[in-house]
Amino acid sequence: MNVSKGGGVLLAAQHRFTVFKIDLSCRGFDSLQCTDIVCAKCPLGHFTIYIFVVYIQPIATVDEYELLFNLLGNFTNLYNQQVIIIGDFNISDYQPTLSSSSLSSRKLSYLFNFLDFCDCQQFNNVRNANDRFLDLVISNRHCSVLRSIDILLDEDIHHPSLLITVVSRESQPKVINRNSLEDKLWNFRRADYPGLYSYISRIDWSCILDITDVNLACTHLYTQLKIGFDLYVPKTGLVRKSVFPPWFSPSIICKLKCKWRLLRKLRSSNYINNSEMINDFRRLRSELKCDIKRAQRQYLLDMESNIKSDPKKFWAYVNSLRKCTGIPAQMTYSGELLNSPEQIINAFSAYFTSNYSDCAVTNIDDYFDTTPNVSISLSNISESEVLGALKKLKSNLTAGHDGIPAFLLSDCASALCYPLTIIFNLILKTKTFPDIWKLSTITPVFKNGARNDVVNYRPISLICNFSKIFEMVDAVYTDFTKAFDKLNHHISLAKLHNFGFSDSLLSLISSYLSNRSQCVKYYGHVSNKILVSSGVPQGLIHSGTWESPLIQD
C-alpha cells in the first residue's frame, strides 16, 4: 500500500495467488511527486503478469504525466513483460473514441504515445456519473472490463466499480500461421555462390538478339536464371523468424543451448548431487549473463551511431519490443468478421485498391494541348548505363514477385548488363513494357489503432528488381504520395503530352501503366490479383519524371 495526501493506492490479492511486490524506487518512480503507484509480480502458471495500481493527483503537472508514461514505457519494453495498469489517471477529456490525430491536450498525447509505443490498449468503457473515464485499464494483453455488481464498499459516483478479466494466452486470438503453406522458395542465404556466379557468367545470351517480342525475351531471361537457381540454390519453406534477440551471436546461442542441456541433466535424479556439474552450470550461467549484457550494449551503441545510415535497424529493434507484430487470425473490414487467411488477405487487397479511382472521363480531348512547347523523348540505352544502375542496387534480400534478390543482380552486374541492355532497348523500340514486370506485391504494415481492423494498415509495395533497374536508367527516384492513386491514366497521359513528351515515349508510358496488377502477400498467403486502374505507380523510378508536370497542373 502506498498513501499520500489526497488519495492512495492499494493492491490486495487472495491467498491462492503468489504475489511479489516490486520495488519501483530503483527504477526512477520515486521521482514522481504527485503520483501514487504500486507494482506486484503475479505468476499465473503459463505466464507472469505485472500489475500496476496508479493514482495521479488532480494537481499533477503535465510534466508529471510525461515522466510517468516514460517510466512505464521503459519498464514495459526494457523488461519485455506482460503488464496491466489500473487506476485513476485524472485525464478528464479522455474518450475511448479518440484517435491520435484528434487529441486536445498534452496529457492525452503522452497517453496515446505510450499506448502506441508499448503496443498497449485502454479497455475501460464504463462511464462514471459525469459521463467521463477517469479510471483507465491499460494492458498489452487482452482484457475484459465490465461494471461490477458485487461490490465490497460504497461506490464513488466518480469511480464505478469494475470487474477486470485478463484473457489467458490460450484464449487470445492467434496470429496467422506464417508457415501454413507448403510452397518452396529459393533460400539464397544458403546458396552455392561460386557455382551460381560462375554459371551466370557462362550463359550465352546471343539468342536474345533474334527475339522481337519483349515478353518472350523476359521469359528467356528468367528461364536461364532459374536453371542456375535450381542447380545452386536450395529450396526451403518460409524462413521462420529467429526466437533470439538480434544481438545474440552464434557463440551466445551455443552457450545458451549448452546451459539448457546441463539444466535438463541436473533436473534428473542421476545428476542431482553432482557438484561438478552444478558448478559448471553456475559458471556457464554467469558467463552468459555477462556476454548477453555486453552484446546488447554494443548492439545498441552501433544502432545509435548508425541511425542515419541504417534507420531500418532502429525501427526493427523498436518493433521487436512490441509483443504482437503479426496480423491477427480474426479481423474486421466494413463491419464483416474475417476468420480465414484468404478472407483477410483479400480484404486487404480490396481496401488498398479502394484508393484507386475508376471515374470515367467524358471528353479526353479537353485535356490535350496541340502545341506543346518542348519535346521529350528517350534514346537508346548503353551497357555502361545499365551496369551503373545494377551497381546502384542495394545489397539486400529485397525481391519482388519473381523472388530474385537485389544483391544477386548487383553482384552479377557485369554478366547481366548485356542481356538487360538488349531487353531494355527492345522495350524502347517496341514501346511495350513486359507484362511480368507490371505485377507488384503488397505487404500490409500496421499503422495505429485496433490491430484487428483492416483499415488500420498501410500498403508496402514491391516491384521486381529488373523493373527498378530499367527505371533507374536516366531517371530520378521519387516516391509518390497516396494522393496520386486518384490520377486517371488517360488524363495523366494528356498532361504529359502537353508537357512535351513524344508520341513514342507516351506509347511506352501507356504500356507501362496499362494492365498493371497487384496482389497482397503475407508469409505465403496471396490474394487475388487486382487490376490497377488509376494512379502513377508509387515508389517507381519514373514517377519522379512524371511528378512535376502533374503537380504543376
Image (cartoon, helix red, strand yellow):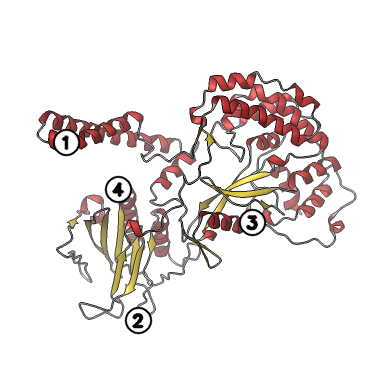
What's under tag 3, amino acid-wise? Answer: Thr
Write down the residue under mark 4: 79
Q: What residue is pinned by disc 3?
A: 353
Instruction: Please state if 25 lies on the left or on the right of 131 as rendered.
Output: left
Q: Which residue is the site of mark 2?
A: 129
Q: Secondary structure at mark 4?
A: loop
Taking the image as shown, residue 539 lies to the left or right of residue 151, namely right
Give the percent coordinates (x, y) of residue 340: 50, 57
Task: Give me the C-alpha separation between circle 3 and circle 1.
Answer: 58 Å
Q: Is residue 477 above or below residue 493?
A: above
Decide which of tag 3 and tag 1 comes sooner along the chain: 1
Up the image or down, 417 lies above or below 160; here it is above
- In x, y percent, where is residue 359? 74, 62
Circles 4, 3 touching at the beta carbon (< 8 Å): no
Tell us which disc is closer to us: 2 or 1.
1
Q: CA distance from mark 4 to mark 2?
A: 38 Å
What kind of residue is marked 1? Answer: Leu
User: Hey, what amino acid is under mark 2?
Assistant: Ala
Q: Quadrant of residue 271?
A: top left
* 250 or 171, nearer to the observer: 171
Q: Earlier in the sequence, mark 1 or mark 4?
A: 4
The mark closer to the camera, 3 or 2, is 3
Mark 1 neighbour density, 10 Å: few (under 14) some (14–19) many (20 or more): some
